[in-house]
Image (cartoon, helix red, strand yellow):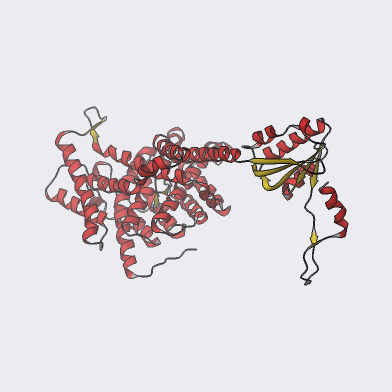
Amino acid sequence: MFSLYIQKRANIKDDILSGLTVALALVPEAVAFSFVAGVQPLVGLYAAFIVGIITAVVGGRPGMISGATGALAVIMIELVAKHGVEYLFAAVVLMGIIQITAGILRLGKFIRLIPHPVMLGFVNGLAIVIFLSQLRHFKIPGESGVLIWMGGTALWMMLGLVGITMAVIHFLPRITRAVPAPLIAILVITVAVTGFNIDTLKVSDMASVGGGLPQFHIPMIPLTWETLVIILPYSLILAVVGLLESLMTLSLVDEITETRGNGNRECFGQGIANVVSGFFGTMGGCAMIGQSMINVNSGGRGRLSGISAAVFLLMCILFASRFIEMIPLAALVGVMFMVVVSTFEWSSFRILHKMPRADAFVLVLVSGVTVFTDLAIAVAAGVVVSALVFAWKSGKNIRIDSHVSARGVSVYSLTGPLFFGSVRKFLEYFEPHKDQENVVIDFKHSRVCDQSGLEALKSLSERYFSHGKRLHLKHLSTECQRFLKSMENFVVINIIEKPQLHVMPGSGRKPMLAPHLKKQQKENYF
């Protein structure tokens, strides 16, 4: 079911060390997303382990990291608040089943339909979201328990530690790449804070990350139709958002590593992971762009990096929780800020004024919607706007050339697609009261693309029939001919089929028209 491709021993080292770095970065994220969803921290940590290891083994993108994410957590809030956490576990199982179905139906290939400006907007928007999500670590509880922004020495200490972390990550690769720079930065800051007894926020200030092994747990809910009605809408949204974020992250990792993942297999892997995750009492998850970028930038390329990240995370929960809780949040914030810097497409500023206005608008739109709503709505909005722009431009590209033949027939040669975006221009060109008795429309350089185009032909035929004239169509596609013939009781159109040519086997002679078609050909040309 899976392959572990490792060609050199150095790859094993890079994958393991990058996995350790990712595991350290996963802890505060999983805890934070658990709070967002309204569940206990271990629910998010176990989700990061189960989803991470299963997708690393059976998923379609080596090197990509999956776990509990904010995009899914914000959808889970309402379900947990209204019906309780057991309904969440059931919804996660159903989400996984939907994703497995998407993989079996090979729906992952539709990621290719997402335009490049949408991809750029997605990347920039997520970079901004990651940046904004880290700002919460610059807040502390006030006197009334409400979080307030840091100030004074605490703020400058936090900023200084974040800056040192970013500097280590930036400059260390110029000296050596033997060890991932983010891992060294985390160790340096942790040792410095512990050694000098610096007063700053640590992972322990968020929550305890210690616990045992995840336990198998069947969701304690009534198996009734009412239960399905409750969880199905949430499961559908979770499945769509999870697959969108996973497939978009897959495409981004493909571009960075110059390799190609398998979208359909990733759908299947995400589904399996979420089904198992739901039955072990966790919140499920999907691909994590931030942690995936940490992994890739730290040298993680193979499946072993994702497996290592999940295993190290479990080890942290079981045995090393007190050491993980010693890590300053400033170190992890610095790592995530460097992810923001490397993720954001800074070149988009340079090319924005050179892009077509519609593409530039889509880029900005997707970025903004990603920040203020969520990924699914942003991608859907970007695709819809791009499709409408394409339809508008294609609709204007239709061209019609006309002349009257020697036999007194009005002949129109159509160039460009006939579809909902071009039917109005197509219909406005014809004036039945001015045409000859017989009118031919040649579709040799055109194609009827949708129902709107077919309805336009039907409407045009009725206009000519009302003036006592006959419409003839040439070079129509087989599908279009079949549809129009099925409507012959309502449509008065003569479809001129392409003459069949017959060649004697092995004769080497040029194709000759079959004798029984000679008369038909003559009639077709009037």
User: Where does the image place residue 14, in percent across and percent down from the top left?
Assistant: 31, 63
- The residue lying at 36 percent from left, 56 percent from top is 310
Query: How many marks do you count on the picture?
Result: 0
**From this viewpoint, which residue is outermost toward the front?**
406
Q: Decide which of 92, 72 is in the foreground and name it.
A: 72
Q: Decide which of 301, 141 is in the foreground and name it.
A: 301
262 relative to 365, above or below:
below
- The residue lying at 36 percent from left, 46 percent from top is 347
Q: Would residue 130 be visible to someone looking at this image? A: yes
In the displayed structure, does residue 391 sit left or right of residue 15? right
User: Where does the image place residue 61, in percent across and percent down from the top left?
Assistant: 44, 57
User: Where does the image place residue 110, in percent across and percent down from the top left?
Assistant: 54, 49
300 relative to 461, above or below:
below
342 relative to 471, above or below:
below
**From this viewpoint, which residue is outermost toward the top?**
144
Q: Would residue 217 be visible to someone looking at this image? A: no
Q: Decide which of 202, 334 is in the foreground and name it.
A: 334
- The residue lying at 39 percent from left, 39 percent from top is 37
**From this viewpoint, which residue is outermost toward the left?**
196
48 relative to 78, above or below:
below
- The residue lying at 12 percent from left, 51 percent from top is 195
In the displayed structure, does residue 485 sit left or right of residue 41? right
User: Where does the image place residue 275, in percent across and percent down from the top left?
Assistant: 49, 50
In the displayed structure, does residue 197 sit left or right of residue 433? left
Q: Decide which of 296, 101 is in the foreground and name it.
A: 296
